[in-house]
Image: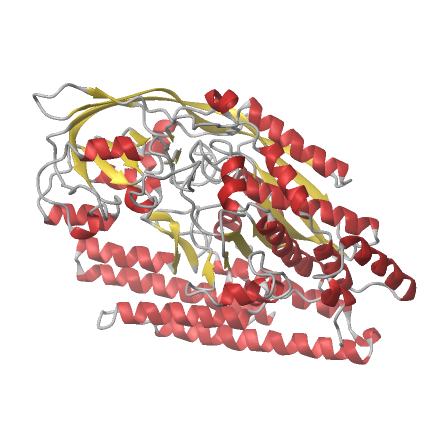
């Protein structure tokens, strides 16, 4: 079969040892092709190795800035060193947040005794990590405002903008009271921000039984669900990177802004907040009277009736945090490219965790290390990547993308001129089903790679076949700020991918995200970890080894067109013209078709005679493909959010996790809705022009021609 390696036929049935023997035989006949090496990569998989890595990484809780996290960093470095991959520590000095004191008490009504919550997560029967459970930090929100607040309780559903609008419409007073919101639909920092804007004095977040398997009475370790005492901790900082160095790297002795300035900017909250358990959340809910909450705000089958308040339940919250500058350690390992060492394919995962981190993030770390070890074995058999592969192990992601953002800011210009793509794997495995998000020029590459990987839950089909059969969108977009791809995409404009098996899991950011949960529910046989390493490594290899970058900008043009159509339908009859945007997209489509034709022409010359191909033309075409994504960025960034430079994909202003197409236009439309003024439509039109201009610039980069 033309163009196919023998390994692609044998990898499912031939053991790794036999595959290696066949590979050596092929070496004696002819130099191995990229496809042969890529098949070798797939043949080297080991679920035992992934399990061993995960067990070693999750022995203790390891929050950024702690000694336990340094031990994890040392383990990662030891694996890379043993694989003979040069690695180094890149330190930064950043503002981290830890809890010093918390208390929460409830006065159900004037005649009832005060209830004090112990705010602890309980050790489960037979917990193999009971001896180190005391090392788990007390439950808290990183960067929550220190202070004491007292107020009647108001139930706010998921704490979204529309939920607070609904309360206003129903005449429910939020100002001066304490908000109770269930977590799960929007970023927790945005919930606290919405509560603050509404005038609340504090915010309490909890996981509702409706979002935690219902009221079955079964939870971990018997079932996969969060126990009644489980708490989702996390950051409420809404920026990216060190809060005190917005836009520049946190090297020692650098310029810093004060915490008060950060709070005044709106990216750190000005009110205290605290996460609580499902059990404590329900106890608070039971003291709320007033109007009955809307039907879609209720708790599901078997739940008591939820009311809105305020009160009569009265909450008293005290939180004292410690915001302090600490050293964090990014780990950077380099496999230098042979032909194009100045072109970088970056692969990243963070290693810090709020607790044990078996899913988030160390399932991804285990897959990441598996990929690195396979690359090292390939090097021993003669493989050298065409382009440089940089393996990045980030610190302090959980505090909100600190380590990766500082490194990107520190290396902004180098990355802007040399980065081909960034591949992210945060938590790799929490259950069944493959999910991917990307910038659109990488869509086809993801699909092709998935066709080469076996589905870990169905050996009779490929990963692509199971993935394509799902009802959910095949590939989502990377505009949100939920993981370490954010700085690459939204600050610099580097094509990026994020991949994982399963999207959400019930013990997220709790003490119960441990190795036992993974072994029982997330991936008992560690086959999904192997598949995660397979797809991550294969995409990296194709980007690093193929002569022509496997980018498809026709797919990008189609996505731009779809997003514009959504906007046009949304604003039908409004005084805004999207003709400039449509025209720029059409120019971009023509440029995408042209570069595709040019690549095919160069490839056809290679088929006739490899000596006829001009390597400078190949390099020039690849540079255009690489640099086009940068052109979607704008120096001024989003209005009010200048760190976010990308005008095509960015986070929602009200949910950092949510990706929005044309976020600056989205923000301007919201401004119209708030002001209700006709003149504000001019701002929408201005943003439409601004987006049209960056798309036109991207067309010029793709064409490689000056006006």
Q: Can the viewer see residue 335 in this picture?
A: no
Q: Residue furthest right?
A: 28
Residue at point 73% right, 49% down? Answer: 375
Q: Is residue 170 above or below residue 18?
A: above
Q: Nearer the viewer, residue 333 or 706?
A: 333
User: On the image, which quarter does residue 252 sit in?
Assistant: top right
183 relative position to 52: left or right: left
Residue at point 31% right, 71% down? Answer: 568
Q: Is residue 97 above or below residue 364?
A: above
User: On the image, which quarter does residue 188 sit in?
Assistant: top left
Q: Nearer the viewer, residue 488 or 550?
A: 550
Please give the count of numbered marks on the rendered protein: 0
Q: Residue 156's spot in the image, x, y percent?
A: 20, 42
Q: Residue 222's spot in the image, x, y percent?
A: 43, 38
- Quarter of the C terminus within the rendering: bottom right
- Quarter of the N terminus within the rendering: bottom right
Residue at point 59% right, 46% down? Answer: 348
Q: Is residue 385 above or below residue 519?
A: below
Q: Nearer the viewer, residue 384 or 368?
A: 368
Q: Is residue 524 above or below residue 603?
A: above
Q: Nearer the viewer, residue 26 or 338?
A: 26
Q: Residue 618's spot in the image, x, y percent?
A: 72, 68
Residue at point 40% right, 71% down? Answer: 562
Colouring mode (rainbow / by chain / secondary structure / one colour): secondary structure
Q: Can the viewer see residue 78 in this picture?
A: yes
Q: Residue 403's spot in the image, x, y percent?
A: 54, 37
């Amino acid at each position: 079969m033309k163009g196919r390696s023998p390994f692609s036929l044998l990898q499912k049935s031939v053991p790794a040892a036999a595959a290696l023997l066949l590979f050596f035989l092929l070496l004696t006949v002819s130099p191995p092709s990229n496809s042969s090496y890529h098949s070798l990569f797939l043949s080297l998989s080991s679920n035992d190795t992934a399990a061993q890595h995960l067990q070693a990484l999750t022995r203790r809780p390891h929050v950024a800035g702690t000694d336990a996290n340094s031990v994890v960093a040392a383990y990662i470095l030891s694996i890379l060193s043993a694989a003979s991959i040069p690695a180094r520590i890149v330190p930064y000095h950043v503002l981290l947040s830890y809890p010093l004191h918390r208390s929460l008490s409830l006065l159900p009504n004037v005649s009832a005794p005060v209830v004090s919550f112990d705010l602890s997560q309980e050790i489960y029967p037979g917990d193999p990590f009971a001896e180190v459970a005391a090392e788990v930090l007390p439950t808290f929100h990183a960067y929550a405002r220190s202070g004491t607040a007292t107020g009647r309780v108001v139930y706010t559903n998921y704490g979204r903008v529309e939920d607070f609008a609904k309360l206003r419409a129903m005449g429910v007073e939020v100002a001066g009271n304490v908000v109770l919101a269930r977590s799960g639909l929007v970023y927790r920092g945005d919930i606290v921000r919405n509560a603050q804007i509404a005038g609340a004095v504090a915010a309490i977040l909890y996981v509702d039984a409706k979002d935690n398997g219902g009221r079955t009475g079964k939870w971990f370790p018997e079932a996969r669900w969060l126990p009644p005492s489980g708490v989702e901790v996390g950051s409420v900082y809404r920026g990216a990177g060190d809060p005190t160095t917005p836009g520049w790297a946190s090297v020692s002795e650098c310029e810093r802004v004060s915490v008060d300035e950060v709070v005044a900017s709106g990216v750190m909250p000005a009110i205290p907040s605290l996460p609580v358990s499902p059990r404590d959340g329900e106890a608070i809910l039971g003291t709320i009277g007033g109007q009955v909450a809307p039907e879609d705000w209720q708790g599901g089958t078997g739940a008591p009736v939820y009311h809105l308040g305020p009160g009569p339940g009265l909450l008293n919250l005290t939180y004292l945090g410690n915001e302090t500058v600490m050293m964090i350690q990014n780990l950077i390992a380099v496999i230098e490219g042979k032909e194009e060492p100045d072109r970088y394919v970056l692969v990243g995962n963070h290693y810090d965790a709020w607790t044990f981190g078996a899913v988030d993030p160390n399932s991804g770390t285990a897959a990441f290390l598996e990929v690195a070890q396979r690359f090292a074995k390939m090097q021993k058999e003669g493989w050298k990547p065409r382009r440089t592969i940089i393996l990045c192990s980030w610190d302090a992601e959980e505090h909100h993308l600190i380590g990766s953002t500082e490194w990107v800011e520190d290396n902004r210009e180098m990355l802007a001129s040399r980065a081909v793509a960034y591949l992210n794997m945060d938590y790799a495995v929490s259950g069944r089903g493959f999910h991917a998000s990307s910038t659109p020029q990488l869509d086809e590459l993801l699909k092709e790679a998935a066709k080469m990987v076996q589905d870990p839950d169905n050996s009779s089909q490929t990963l692509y076949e199971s993935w394509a059969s799902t009802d959910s969108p095949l590939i989502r977009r990377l505009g949100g700020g939920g993981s370490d791809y954010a700085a690459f995409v939204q600050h610099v404009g580097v094509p990026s991918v994020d991949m994982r098996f399963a999207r959400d899991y019930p013990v997220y950011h709790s003490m119960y995200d441990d190795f036992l949960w993974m072994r029982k529910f997330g991936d008992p046989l560690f086959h999904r970890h192997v598949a995660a390493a397979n797809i991550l490594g294969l995409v990296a290899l194709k980007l690093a080894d193929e002569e022509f970058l496997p980018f498809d900008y026709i797919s990008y043009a189609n996505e731009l067109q779809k997003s514009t159509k959504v906007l046009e339908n949304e604003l039908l009859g409004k005084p805004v013209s999207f003709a400039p945007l449509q025209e720029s997209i059409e120019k971009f489509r023509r440029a995408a078709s042209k570069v595709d034709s040019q690549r095919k022409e160069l490839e056809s010359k290679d088929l006739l005679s490899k000596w006829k191909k001009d390597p400078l033309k190949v390099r020039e075409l690849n540079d255009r493909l690489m640099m086009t994504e940068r052109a979607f960025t704008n120096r001024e960034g989003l209005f009010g959010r200048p760190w976010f430079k990308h005008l095509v994909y960015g986070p929602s202003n009200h949910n950092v996790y949510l990706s929005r197409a044309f976020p600056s236009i989205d923000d301007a439309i919201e401004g119209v809705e708030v002001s209700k003024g006709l003149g504000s439509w001019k701002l929408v039109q201005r943003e439409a022009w601004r987006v049209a201009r960056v798309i036109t610039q991207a067309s010029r980069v793709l064409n490689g021609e000056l006006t």
